[in-house]
Image (cartoon, helix red, strand yellow):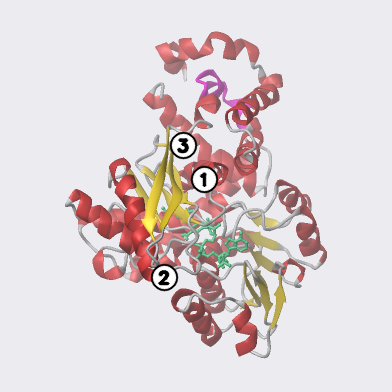
Amino acid sequence: MFWREETPLGRLSATDARSRYTKEKIVDLINEVLAIVKRRNPNEAEFFQAVEEVLFSLEPLLKAEPKYVNAGILHRIIEPERQIIFRVAWVDDKGRMQVNRGYRIQFNSALGPYKGGLRFHPSVNGSILRFLGFEQIFKNSLTGLMMGGAKGGADFDPKGKTDTEVMRFCYSMMTELYRHIGPNTDVPAGDIGVGGREIGFLFGQYKRLKNEFTGVLTGKALNWGGSLIRPEATGYGAVYFAHEMLAAAGDDIGGKICAVSGSGNVAQYTVEKLNQLGAKAVTLSDSGGFIHDPDGIDGEKLAYVMELKNVRRGRISEYAEKYKSATFVPGQRPWNVKCDCAFPSATQNEISGDDAKTLVKNGCKVVTEGANMPTTLEGTEVFLGNKILFGPGKAANAGGVAVSGLEMAQNSQRMMWTGEEVDEKLQGIMKSIFTTCSETAAKYGHPGNYVVGANIGGFVKVADAMLDQGLG
Ligand code: NDP
Ligand code: 2IT
């Protein structure tokens, strides 16, 4: 727009960018920005991977809309607004002092308060949280709700810890985190290793420290400010997204054989919704291996998994001891099981290029990412090259954060909506995300490529808000 060109920002940013980056040279710009990411964040493979995928898919947009280049949006969007790293010291049940590292990456607040989960896992480091925080910016934008992007967590391993150890860890984590967050500043939630139990302990400590009962966290229990359908939202949303992709291709999820990985929050509610829609989930996994149950993981078996994983905190291998129809394969992921649809719902980079080829060879037609970045760049190319209906995580798993946004809205109103109301809104949001992905992909010359659609669709809203808000 003309007036933007005339703003001080427009003149400032235009100095060399406009002359150096002609349409033909957009790829040079992308490579220059990637080099900055690498220099500032050396050896951060996951963060680099997430940025590389997004920036290259923006190419057609940047060629059509030089305003983003002129205002230096790429240079700004790859640098978190604020990054907090802190010591978390706590005492275990034997009275020994333990130390972990805590993080909060407040990546982008152009669209609203920072929003994104906390991950507790021994693998947590800056690279993983920066990749997750970066993805969260575009995911939150796609929901259409007003939320910025953030991620946090700690290299704490909840496995094998008692409830009291987890409680003391959460208290100590919040004793530092509380000064950086708030219902209008930054609203964390769960992710791997952080569920209802951890959110409760974190909330209790925040409330004591601030003497305020506010919606500072989402994923709260239903009896003290949580939203109906939040626990279900990511898994349900992923299946709704798969349903939309199939419907647009004239097909239906009913009767489909589905391979699901993970056995935590996202995987469990993916299986529940698949069952409700008449599909058959035949696999689940954890870091020990996967189970294959060709008879399908029906409602009764799923109830067993929920008790096993959420209450007893056991291993998925126990499923095959309980149900003789199932086999347990240690140390492997479920991608060589013949299926129509795959729902990777455990962790990043769990589908390699070879796994993707195996899935395609075995007839898989739909891949819906319940997890964040579960497919490597090589795997993504295999799926796109074979015209698989591929729902990238930042679109397909956005249902979780979307219902977190609805939890924030309910907390602000001091109201609680019915489950039907929230589920209806979730379905509407997933449908609208699919429409954005589909229409944007077509508009920029890549029809059916929902990776391009999600990345450009998510980026435009954030970038426009950054333009409106000036330098920052
Ligand atoms: P949970 O902690 O509930 O479950 C995680 C599951 O994944 C467990 O079965 C776990 O097995 C498995 N897993 C974790 N890390 C690894 C690993 N390195 N190798 C193999 N298996 C692993 O987490 P969620 O279900 O909440 O999260 C799953 C994925 O979904 C993550 O990528 C998360 O970022 C993403 N996501 C979650 C949302 C949410 O609302 N919860 C929203 C959007 C995305 P084990 O118990 O052996 O570790
Ligand atoms: O990756 C994600 O979107 C989440 N873990 C959920 C974040 C949230 O704020 O609900």
Q: Nearer the viewer, residue 174 or 138?
A: 174
- Mark 3 and mark 2: Cα distance apart in space: 43 Å
Residue 300, image x, y percentages: 52, 87
Name which residue lies at 68% across and 26% down: 31
Judged left or right of residue 204, residue 80 is: right
Q: Residue furthest right?
A: 361
**Badge 3: residue crowd in 10 Å (few <14, some 14–19, many ≥20):** some
Q: Which residue is mark 1?
A: 129
As rendered, which of 301 and 298 lies closer to the eye? 301
Q: Which residue is mark 2?
A: 162
**Residue 410 in the image: x percent, y percent?**
27, 58
**SS assignment at label 2:** loop
Compared to residue 453, the image places residue 434 above or below, namely below
The amino acid on which the numbered mark 3 sits, given as a three-letter code, is Lys
Q: Nearer the viewer, residue 234 or 150?
A: 150
| Residue 64 forms part of the magenta stretch | yes
Q: Mark 3 falls on what kind of element?
A: helix
For label 3, the residue is 461
